[in-house]
Image (cartoon, coloured by chain):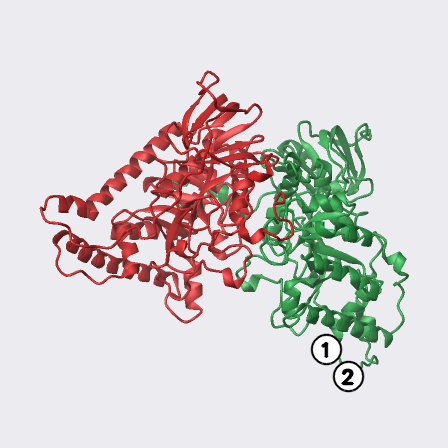
Chain colours: A red, B green
C-alpha cells in the first residue's frame, strides 16, 4: 500500500520534471543541431566540489535489523560496504567478501544516514555571535544572487554534533527566511573539512530558498519597505519571476544563436537555473492557504516547488500537496512561536504521509538536528494513536529517502541499495528509542564516527584548547 | 467543567472530573515511579484521597470502598513539574500583545510579579497538560534590569485558579544577558546587584523589623518547605507612607521593597548563569549576603566546578541537552552536565531556559530520557532512570521549596498523577490520564481538534468549518 503510494508519487514527480524540460528548451539539444561552436557563456559550477571520500575498509555488518530507507525491513540483515559504496544488503546468507572487517550487529539497527533538508549549520554557527551571523542577507527582499556556501564556516562545532549524536550524513544548508528569495542553498556531506568546497556533495543540484508569510513582510514592512503584506510578498515574487523569464529568454537565445552576450545578473542566473529545472525550489511556508498560492505561482511561471519547508499546515492540504508532487519538510511538534505556527498539530507528519504525499522530518535547528530520529519517532507514535499505522521502516523514509528525493540526490544516497553511496549508521538500539545513539557512522564507506574510539570523534578547530575539548557531547 | 472523552482514558472515566476531591481512588496494576529518584515498581498501587496522595508503591492496600482504576500495562508517575518555564505568560511568542514575559518599557524590575499575568486558558497550558505536565515554575524575563521580577509556581489544571504559590522567587540574570541589561559588562551587573540589595537593606531599616533571616548556616540548608509569608502578605509594610529613603537610590521603592525578602532569605533567588566563572561569582555572593537562598539556573559549565556547587549546597535547574558552544559562556556544554552535577551530589532539575520555555515544557521528559541514553556511550555520564524522572518531578519541586507539596507520589503530596501508555521517558509514550489535585483533567485542545477535523483533508458536503 505504502509502496504503491510512493511509486505513484515518483511517477508524478517524473512527469512534472519532464514537463519542466519541455518548457525550458535545454540549450544543448538546440546547439547539437547547429554545426558552429556554442558562444562563450558563464559557468554553472564556479565553486566546484573538491570533496573526496576518505579511506574506508571493506566492512560487513551482520545480524542487525536493517531499515533500507525506502521502506524495506530486513531482520538479521547483512550490509556490506566497500569502495565507498553499498555492495550488498540482504539476509544472513548474504556473501561477505574475504578479509572484510566484520561487525556484529546483533541487537543493533542499521539505517541509511539521516539527511536534513533544512539546516543553517555553518551560516548560523556556534558560537552564535554577531560576527558569525551570516544566514540572512536582509538588505533586500529579493536576493537570489547570494549563495549559502559563501557563508558556511566549516569549523562550526554543530557539524560534529549532528554526526555523532544525530547520525546525519548529509544536509542542505539554506539561507534564512528574511527574504522572499533568500539565495542558493548548498548540499554537503557531513564531513569535517577546511573548506566548504571540500564538503560539497558532488553532483547535488543547487536549491533556491524562498519564503512566504510573516518573515519577509515583517522584516521589510517594519522598515516601511515592500513587502509589508502577504499580497506584496506575492506581487514581488511574481514581478521577479517575470524578470527571470525575460532574462532566461535572452540568455537561451544567446546560447542558442550567439550574438552579443547579454548583461550578467547573478540574481537572475539563479532564477534562470530554477526555470531550467537545474535548481530546486525549497519554499519556507507555514500556512495551507499560502502554500496553495505558491503552487499556483509556480505553475504561472513554470517551475516546480521541490519542498515546502516547515509546512506547519500541510496536513490541511495534504491532498493538494500529493497531487502536485511536493514534499513537506516538517517538525514533529513545534507550535505557537508565531502566528503562522498557531495551527500546528503533532500529527502533521503522519497525516501528510497518510494522504500519500511526501513527508520529511527536518530540523532548522542545531540541537534538533541531533535528534531527527527521535522527532520521527514522536510523530510516528502520534500518528498511530489516531489510527495511522505506519511501520517503523516506512517511517524511516521521512529521514533519508524522502529528503534525498527533495534534494535531487536520491539516485546517489538516502537508501541502502547496492551501488549507492555507503552513508550508513549503526545504532546501538532501536533508532526510534530515546535511549539509542549512533554507535558508528560511515560516509561514503569511511568510518567517520565510532562511539568506542575517541580518535573517531571530530573536534573542530574552534573547540581545540577550550574546556570540554573532545568530551562526549 | 466540560465533558471530555478520550479513547485511551475512557475506561478510567469513572473517576470523573470535578468530583474526585472527596473520593478515595486506587490506581492499581501499573508500573509506579514515585519520582523521588527511586526506580520504578512493577505492579504498584497509588491511593489518592481528598486530592492528596495517601500511599504509593508495592503492597499498598486498596482501601475499602475505593474506586479502582486498573492501570495494568501502564506507567504511573507524579505529574511533571516544569523546572523553569514561562507557561501561562504567552499565547503566541511573536504576537507581542499576548506575550507577558518582559516589559521593555516599564520603570519596574524586581517588583514585577508574574502571578496576575498567568492565563489558565493559554493554549500552552492545555497542550502541556495533555503532555503530562501538571505544575510549572514560571519566571518573568528581564528587560532593562538584571532583575526580572518575581516568579510563581502554577498548576496546569482546567480551571481558573492556576497560581499555586505567588512570589515564590526572584529571578536575576548575571551572565551575558545580565551584563547586557546592566549596561554592558559583568562588573556593572555585580555592582547593580550589590547596590540593589543595599537599597533593600536601607529600606528595611526604615520599616518595621521583620522576622526571618537567620544565621548563615541555617541559610545554607537545602531549600526546604518552609512557609513563605510572601504569598499572602506582600511587601506592603515596606511601603508605609512614613518610610523615608536616602537620596542616592537607583531603584524604585517598589523594586527595593521586593528585594527585602531576597536579602533576608525569605524568598528564593534564582540566578541565571552559564559560565563556570560566573557560577563561582554567584556562589561567592553568599559571603557578602549570607542569607541569600540561591538556585542556579542554566549552569551549562557547571560540571567543571561541580565540587564547588556541591559544597555550597545550591540546587541547579539546567537545560538538559545543551551541548554546543552556542555562546562563549557555554564552551564546555555537554549532555553529560546534568549527570555529572548529580554525581557530585547536587540536586539537579531540568528547565527550559530561554528556549521554548513557554510552550514546550512537555518535551522535558524526552530530554530526561536522553540523559539516560548517555549511559550507553563510552565516556558519557548518565542518570539512572529514576534520577532522570526526578529531574522533572521531585527535584524542581524541592529546588523551589515545595517538595512537600508537589513533585512526587510520597504520602501527603498533592494528587498530581499521570497514567502513561508506557515508559514516560520514551518517544512513543503519551499521557492517557492526567490528574491534578485529585481532579481528572481534559486532554483535548486547539491542536487535537484541528487534528480531528483534518483527519482526512478533503472536504465533504460542507466546508471544514462545519466539522467539529
SS state under label 2: loop
Q: Tell me if residue B232 comes above or below residue A76 in the rendering.
A: below
Tag 1 residue: B250
Q: Mark 2 points at which residue?
A: B247
> Looking at the rendering, which quadrant does residue B118 occupy?
bottom right
Q: Which of the labelled discs sits on residue A431, or is there none?
A: none
User: x%, y% of residue A211?
Assistant: 39, 55
- Location of residue A77 with respect to B291 vertically, above or below: above
Q: Tell me residue A52's x, y (percent).
A: 40, 41
Parent chain of label 2: B
Q: In the figure, B216 relative to A396: above or below?
A: below
- The quarter of the rendered structure image containing the C terminus of chain A is top right
Seen as rendered, the residue at the extreme bottom is B247
Is any atom of residue B202 visible in this view?
Answer: yes
Q: Position of residue B198 (x, y in %)?
A: 80, 73
Q: Residues within 10 Å of mark 2 (few under 14, many from 20)?
A: few
Location of residue B46 by image quarter? top right
Q: Can residue A312 be seen in this view?
A: no
Q: Is residue B11 found left or right of A186 in the rendered image?
A: right
Q: Nearer the viewer, residue A60 or A291?
A: A60
Task: Give neighbour class at mark 1: few <14, some 14-19, many 20+ (Cα, 10 Å).
Answer: few
**Label 1: which secondary element:** loop
Compute the Cα span from label 2 to label 1: 9 Å
Amino acid at each position: 500500500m505504502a509502496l504503491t503510494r510512493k511509486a505513484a508519487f515518483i511517477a508524478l514527480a517524473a512527469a512534472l520534471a519532464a514537463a519542466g524540460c519541455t518548457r525550458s528548451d535545454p540549450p544543448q539539444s538546440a546547439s547539437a543541431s547547429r554545426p558552429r561552436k556554442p558562444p562563450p557563456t558563464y559557468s554553472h559550477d564556479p565553486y566546484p566540489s573538491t570533496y573526496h571520500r576518505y579511506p574506508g575498509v571493506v566492512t560487513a555488518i551482520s545480524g542487525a535489523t536493517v531499515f533500507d530507507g525506502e521502506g524495506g525491513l530486513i531482520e538479521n540483515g547483512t550490509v556490506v560496504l566497500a569502495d565507498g559504496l553499498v555492495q550488498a544488503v540482504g539476509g544472513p546468507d548474504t556473501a561477505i567478501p574475504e578479509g572484510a572487517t566484520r561487525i556484529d550487529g546483533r541487537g543493533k539497527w542499521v539505517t541509511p544516514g539521516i539527511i536534513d533538508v533544512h539546516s543553517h549549520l555553518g551560516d548560523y554557527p556556534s558560537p552564535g555571535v554577531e560576527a558569525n551571523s551570516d544566514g540572512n542577507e536582509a538588505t533586500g527582499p529579493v536576493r537570489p544572487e547570494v549563495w549559502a556556501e559563501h557563508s558556511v564556516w566549516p569549523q562550526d562545532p554543530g557539524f560534529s554534533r549532528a554526526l555523532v549524536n544525530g547520525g546525519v550524513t548529509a544536509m542542505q544548508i539554506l539561507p534564512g527566511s528574511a527574504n522572499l528569495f533568500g539565495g542558493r542553498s548548498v548540499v554537503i556531506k557531513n564531513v569535517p573539512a577546511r573548506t566548504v568546497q571540500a564538503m560539497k556533495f558532488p553532483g547535488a543540484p543547487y536549491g533556491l530558498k524562498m519564503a512566504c508569510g510573516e518573515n519577509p513582510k515583517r522584516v521589510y514592512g517594519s522598515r516601511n519597505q515592500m513587502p509589508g503584506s502577504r499580497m506584496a510578498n506575492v506581487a514581488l515574487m511574481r514581478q521577479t519571476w517575470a524578470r527571470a523569464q525575460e532574462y532566461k529568454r535572452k540568455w537561451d537565445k544567446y546560447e542558442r544563436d550567439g550574438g552579443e552576450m547579454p548583461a550578467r545578473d547573478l540574481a537572475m542566473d539563479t532564477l534562470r537555473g530554477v526555470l531550467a529545472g537545474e535548481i530546486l525550489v525549497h519554499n519556507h511556508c507555514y500556512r495551507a492557504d499560502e502554500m496553495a498560492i505558491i503552487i499556483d505561482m509556480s505553475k504561472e511561471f513554470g517551475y516546480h516547488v521541490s519542498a515546502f519547508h516547515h509546512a506547519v499546515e500541510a496536513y490541511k492540504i495534504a491532498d493538494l500537496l500529493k497531487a502536485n508532487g511536493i514534499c513537506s519538510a516538517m517538525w514533529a511538534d513545534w507550535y505557537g512561536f508565531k502566528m503562522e505556527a498557531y495551527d500546528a498539530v503533532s500529527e502533521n507528519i503522519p497525516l501528510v504521509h497518510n494522504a500519500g504525499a511526501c513527508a520529511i522530518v527536518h530540523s532548522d535547528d542545531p540541537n534538533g538536528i541531533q535528534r531527527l530520529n527521535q522527532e520521527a519517532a514522536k510523530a510516528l507514535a502520534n500518528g498511530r494513536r489516531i489510527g495511522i499505522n505506519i511501520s517503523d521502516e516506512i517511517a524511516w523514509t521521512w529521514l533519508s529517502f524522502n529528503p534525498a528525493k527533495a534534494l535531487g540526490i536520491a539516485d546517489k544516497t538516502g537508501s541502502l541499495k547496492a551501488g549507492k553511496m555507503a552513508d550508513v549508521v549503526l545504532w546501538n538500539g532501536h533508532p526510534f528509542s530515546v535511549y539509542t545513539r549512533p554507535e558508528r557512522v560511515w560516509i561514503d564507506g569511511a568510518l567517520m564516527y565510532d562511539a568506542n574510539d575517541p580518535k573517531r570523534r571530530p573536534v573542530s578547530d574552534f573547540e581545540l584548547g577550550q574546556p570540554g575539548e573532545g568530551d562526549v557531547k | 467543567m466540560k465533558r471530555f472523552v478520550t479513547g485511551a482514558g475512557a475506561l478510567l472515566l469513572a473517576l470523573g472530573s470535578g468530583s474526585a476531591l472527596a473520593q478515595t481512588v486506587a490506581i492499581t496494576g501499573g508500573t509506579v515511579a514515585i519520582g523521588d529518584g527511586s526506580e520504578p515498581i512493577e505492579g504498584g498501587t497509588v491511593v489518592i484521597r481528598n486530592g492528596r496522595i495517601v500511599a504509593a508503591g508495592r503492597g499498598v492496600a486498596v482501601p475499602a470502598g475505593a474506586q479502582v482504576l486498573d492501570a495494568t500495562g501502564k506507567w504511573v508517575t507524579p505529574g511533571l513539574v516544569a523546572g523553569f518555564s514561562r507557561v501561562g505568560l504567552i499565547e503566541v511568542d511573536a504576537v507581542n500583545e499576548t506575550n507577558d514575559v518582559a516589559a521593555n518599557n516599564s520603570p519596574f524590575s524586581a517588583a514585577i510579579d508574574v502571578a496576575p499575568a498567568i492565563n489558565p486558558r493559554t493554549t500552552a497550558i492545555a497542550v502541556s497538560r495533555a503532555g503530562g505536565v501538571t505544575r510549572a515554575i514560571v519566571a518573568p524575563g528581564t528587560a532593562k534590569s538584571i532583575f526580572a521580577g518575581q516568579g510563581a509556581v502554577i498548576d496546569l489544571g482546567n480551571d481558573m485558579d492556576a497560581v499555586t504559590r505567588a512570589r515564590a522567587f526572584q529571578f536575576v540574570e548575571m551572565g551575558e544577558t545580565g551584563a547586557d541589561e546592566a549596561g554592558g559588562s559583568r562588573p556593572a551587573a555585580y555592582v547593580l546587584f550589590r547596590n540593589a540589595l543595599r537599597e533593600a537593606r536601607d529600606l528595611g531599616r526604615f520599616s518595621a523589623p521583620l522576622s526571618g533571616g537567620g544565621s548563615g548556616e541555617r541559610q545554607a540548608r537545602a531549600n526546604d518547605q518552609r512557609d513563605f509569608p510572601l504569598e499572602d502578605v506582600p511587601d506592603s509594610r515596606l511601603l508605609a507612607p512614613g518610610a523615608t529613603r536616602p537620596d542616592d537610590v537607583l531603584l524604585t521603592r517598589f523594586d527595593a521593597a521586593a528585594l527585602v525578602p531576597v536579602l533576608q532569605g525569605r524568598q528564593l533567588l534564582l540566578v541565571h548563569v552559564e559560565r563556570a566563572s560566573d557560577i563561582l561569582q554567584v556562589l561567592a555572593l553568599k559571603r557578602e549576603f549570607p542569607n541569600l537562598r540561591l538556585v542556579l539556573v542554566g549552569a551549562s559549565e557547571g560540571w567543571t566546578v561541580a565540587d564547588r556547587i556541591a559544597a555550597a549546597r545550591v540546587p541547579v535547574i539546567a537545560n538538559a541537552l545543551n551541548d554546543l558552544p552556542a555562546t562563549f559562556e557555554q564552551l564546555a556544554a555537554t549532555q553529560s552536565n546534568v549527570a555529572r552535577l548529580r554525581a557530585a551530589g547536587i540536586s539537579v532539575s531540568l528547565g527550559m531556559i530561554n528556549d521554548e520555555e513557554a510552550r514546550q515544557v512537555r518535551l522535558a521528559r524526552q530530554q530526561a530520557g536522553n540523559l539516560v541514553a548517555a549511559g550507553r556511550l563510552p565516556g558519557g555520564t548518565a542518570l539512572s532512570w529514576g534520577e532522570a524522572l526526578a529531574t522533572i518531578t521531585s527535584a524542581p519541586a524541592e529546588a523551589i521549596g515545595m517538595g512537600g507539596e508537589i513533585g512526587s507520589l510520597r504520602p501527603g503530596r498533592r494528587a498530581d498523577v499521570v497514567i502513561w501508555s508506557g515508559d514516560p521517558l520514551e518517544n512513543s509514550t503519551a499521557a492517557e490520564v492526567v490528574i491534578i489535585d485529585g481532579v481528572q483533567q481534559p486532554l483535548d485542545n486547539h491542536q487535537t481538534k484541528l487534528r480531528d477535523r483534518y483527519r482526512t483533508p478533503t472536504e465533504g458536503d460542507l466546508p471544514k468549518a462545519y466539522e467539529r
